[in-house]
């Protein structure tokens, strides 16, 4: 499937999936790490060793005990794609597996950009053919999609192990 056709399909699918992406992956991702952060998490009873600057005096005076605020740290995600370039993906009845992979790579990459996350990839056959470090930005994402659609393969066969070790 040529690049322009894949990009037109991605645009069509992207319109459909944009609402899903916004509702499921909206905003920054919550971290499991509690600590100083920007997003309020909860008010809980003060435990010896807690930062006294975080005491919630309003809640403490209402409940006649000392309570402290906790916050949740926000983190960015890095999406790292492992992309098979072997000839085994060229088979398929209506649509080749390579075409499906290219569309999925484009969708995941654009979803990551929409959420302001970094995205990178390892392209592999029987070895790593091309390495793209995780970076933010639409220009980077479009380059990654372009590489996925038009990369010239040098190796033969398919071996996932080197790509997994590198990722």
Image: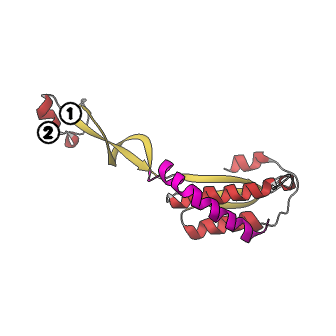
User: Measuring 58% from the left and 55% from the top, which residue is drawn there?
Assistant: 17
Residue 129 visible: yes
Residue position marked by numbered label 1 in the rendering: 67
Closer mark to the observer between disc 2 and disc 1: 2
The one nearer the camera, 165 or 97, is: 97
User: Measuring 74% from the left and 55% from the top, which residue is drawn there?
Assistant: 100
Horizontally, residue 21 falls left or right of residue 99, namely left
User: Measuring 72% from the left and 71% from the top, which residue is drawn there?
Assistant: 4
Residue 120 image-quadrant placement: bottom right
The one nearer the camera, 1 or 124, is: 1
Horizontally, residue 158 falls left or right of residue 65, namely right
Residue 118 percent across, percent down from the top left: 55, 58
Within the magenta stretch, is there residue 31?
no
Residue 99 image-quadrant placement: bottom right
**Above/below status of 36 relative to 138:** above
Residue 158 percent across, percent down from the top left: 84, 50
User: Measuring 44% from the left and 43% from the top, which residue is drawn there?
Assistant: 31
Horizontally, residue 36 falls left or right of residue 4, namely left
The one nearer the camera, 112 or 69, is: 112
Residue 134 visible: no
Residue position marked by numbered label 2 in the rendering: 58
């Amino acid at each position: 499937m040529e690049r322009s056709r894949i990009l037109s399909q991605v645009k069509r699918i992207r319109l459909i999936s944009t609402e899903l992406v916004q509702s499921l992956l909206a905003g920054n991702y919550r971290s499991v790490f509690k600590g100083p952060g920007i997003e309020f998490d909860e008010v809980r009873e003060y435990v010896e060793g807690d930062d006294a600057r975080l005491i919630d005096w309003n809640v403490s005076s209402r409940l006649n005990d000392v309570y402290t605020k906790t916050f949740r740290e926000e983190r960015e995600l890095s999406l790292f794609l492992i992309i098979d370039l072997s000839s085994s993906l060229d088979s398929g009845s209506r649509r080749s597996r390579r075409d499906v992979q290219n569309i999925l790579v484009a969708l995941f990459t654009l979803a990551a950009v929409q959420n302001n996350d970094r995205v990178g990839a390892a392209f592999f056959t029987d070895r790593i053919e091309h390495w793209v470090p995780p970076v933010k930005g639409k220009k980077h994402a479009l380059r990654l999609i372009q590489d996925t659609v038009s990369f010239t393969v040098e190796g033969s066969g398919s071996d996932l192990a080197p790509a997994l070790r590198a990722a």
